[in-house]
Structure formats: structure tokens, C-alpha cells
Image (cartoon, rainbow, N blue to C red):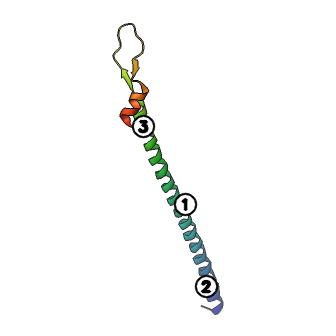
């Protein structure tokens, strides 16, 4: 193997190492971006869960009678006065 061939081989290896380094850097960047997205998604999911629980609490003032008397097409909905419902849940 001549000195010339060694020089060419060294340059090819250097280029290959540079390409691998660039690929690893890109993978690291994408991994960091994914980590941020997962954290944001988790935070949003927690917020949605809290909002859903609050909505369930607010909607619990409604009492749905699912038995249908003859001739009535829809279930009847009754509520307790809002002030009483809020006081019983310590929302007001």
C-alpha cells in the first residue's frame, strides 16, 4: 500500500466519521425535542384530567331519571338549586 493510498483511505474514514458524528448529533437533537413534547403532552393531559373532574363535579347537580314513563320520549332531568349544589361541593 502506497502513501497515496493511505492518504485517500484516511480521508474516506474521516468523512465517514464526520457523517456518523452528524447523524448522532441529529438523533440527540430529535431526542431532546421529543422529551420536551412528552413533558408538554403530560402537562396537558394532567390539565385535561383536572378539567374533566371539575366538569363531572359541576354536572353532578343534575339527576337523570332513565326510566321512561309511557308516552315520554326522553329521560327527565331534575336539578337541585344551584346554590345548594355549590355549597355542598364547596365550589362557591
Circle 1 sits on which residue?
A: 33
What secondary structure is found at the residue carrying circle 1? helix
Q: From this view, report whether residue 41 is shown above or below residue 30.
A: above
Circle 2 sits on which residue?
A: 10
Q: Quadrant of residue 18?
A: bottom right
Q: From this view, report whether residue 48 is shown above or below residue 4.
A: above
Q: Looking at the image, which is closer to me, 47 or 60?
A: 60
Between the residue at mark 2 and the residue at mark 3, the CA separation in whole angstroms equals: 73 Å
User: Image check: 90 left or right of 44?
Assistant: left
Ranked by sequence position, the earlier of labels 3 and 1 is 1
Between the residue at mark 3 and the residue at mark 1, the CA separation in whole angstroms equals: 39 Å
Q: Could one spot residue 9 in this view of the protein?
A: yes
Residue for point 57% across, 74% down: 21
What secondary structure is found at the residue carrying circle 2? helix
Q: Are marks 2 and 3 in contact (CB under 8 Å)?
A: no
Between the residue at mark 2 and the residue at mark 1, the CA separation in whole angstroms equals: 35 Å
Amino acid at each position: 500500500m502506497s502513501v497515496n493510498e493511505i492518504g485517500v483511505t484516511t480521508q474516506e474514514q474521516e468523512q465517514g466519521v464526520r457523517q456518523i458524528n452528524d447523524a448522532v448529533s441529529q438523533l440527540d437533537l430529535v431526542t431532546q425535542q421529543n422529551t420536551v413534547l412528552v413533558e408538554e403532552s403530560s402537562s396537558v393531559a394532567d390539565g385535561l384530567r383536572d378539567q374533566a373532574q371539575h366538569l363531572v363535579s359541576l354536572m353532578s347537580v343534575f339527576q337523570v331519571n332513565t326510566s321512561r314513563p309511557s308516552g315520554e320520549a326522553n329521560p327527565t332531568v331534575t336539578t337541585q338549586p344551584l346554590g345548594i349544589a355549590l355549597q355542598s361541593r364547596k365550589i362557591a
